[in-house]
Image (tube, rainbow, N blue to C red):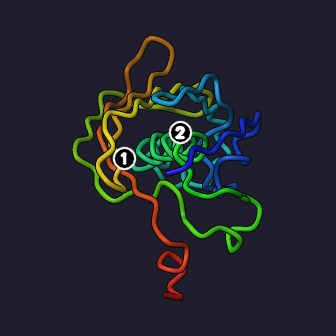
Amino acid sequence: MKTYQHRFDNVTDYLHHRAPYLMVDQIVSISSKEVVTEKKLTGEEFFFPGHFPGAQVLPGAMMQEMTTQSAGIVIAAEYNPMQEYNTHDPHFNEYALGVLVKVKRARYRGFARPGDLLTATVTLQEIVGDVYEFSARIVSGEQRLTENRFQLSNIKSTVLSGVA
């Protein structure tokens, strides 16, 4: 597998996700084994009005998504099997990088609310074939919100788009 050598400053140079589903605002640090990212919750996110009216909290599924997207940054930066990679034209790429295939463990310990700054630390634990296993945690200030362990895989873009 060839390593993708480019380093970018913008999250969207690594991920295909876009608003309103993009759960990473910035990359704080990145290495071949770990990424630290941040997300500032504005209160304008699409999920807050319905989760829960009068007591808005970030859904646990969106915390999982933040860690999954962060792990996808590591894969795009360090374990991308393609010579060229284009996040602005998903039909250009042979592979969809970092597709969630398994959540092994997820534990939620607190709530995130509008105005909170979330910091995710995501660590690559193991690579077995085409499967990348990560552990992650999200904190807001000193409060630990979640810890999880999950697996991602690179799959053919045609499989993802249903054109296979």
Q: Is residue 14 above or below residue 111?
A: below
- Residue 81's spot in the image, x, y percent? 55, 55
The residue shown at (63%, 50%) is 22
Q: Is residue 41 above or below residue 49?
A: above
The amino acid pointed to by label 1 is Tyr
Q: Along the polypeptide, which appears first: circle 2 or circle 1?
A: 2
- Residue 142's spot in the image, x, y percent? 44, 11
Looking at the image, which is closer to me, 98 or 110?
A: 98
Q: Which residue is mark 2?
A: 74
Looking at the image, which is closer to me, 3 or 119?
A: 3
Looking at the image, which is closer to me, 59 or 158?
A: 158
Tell me whether circle 2 and circle 1 mark residues in contact (CB < 8 Å): yes
Pointer 1 local density, CA inside 10 Å: few below 14, some 14–19, many at least 20: many
The residue shown at (75%, 37%) is 8
On residue 111, the disc is none
Pointer 2 local density, CA inside 10 Å: few below 14, some 14–19, many at least 20: many
43 sits to left or right of 164:
right
Dot 2 falls on a residue whose secondary structure is helix
Q: Is residue 90 above or below residue 38?
A: below
Q: Which residue is mark 1?
A: 132
Q: Is residue 55 above or below residue 32?
A: below
The amino acid pointed to by label 2 is Val
The residue shown at (75%, 67%) is 89
Q: Is residue 103 visible?
A: yes
The residue shown at (47%, 79%) is 159
21 sits to left or right of 54:
right
Q: How many marks?
A: 2
- Residue 130's spot in the image, x, y percent? 37, 56
In the displayed image of the protein, which residue is found farthest to the top? 142
Dot 1 falls on a residue whose secondary structure is strand
In the displayed image of the protein, which residue is found farthest to the bottom? 163
- Residue 131's spot in the image, x, y percent? 34, 53
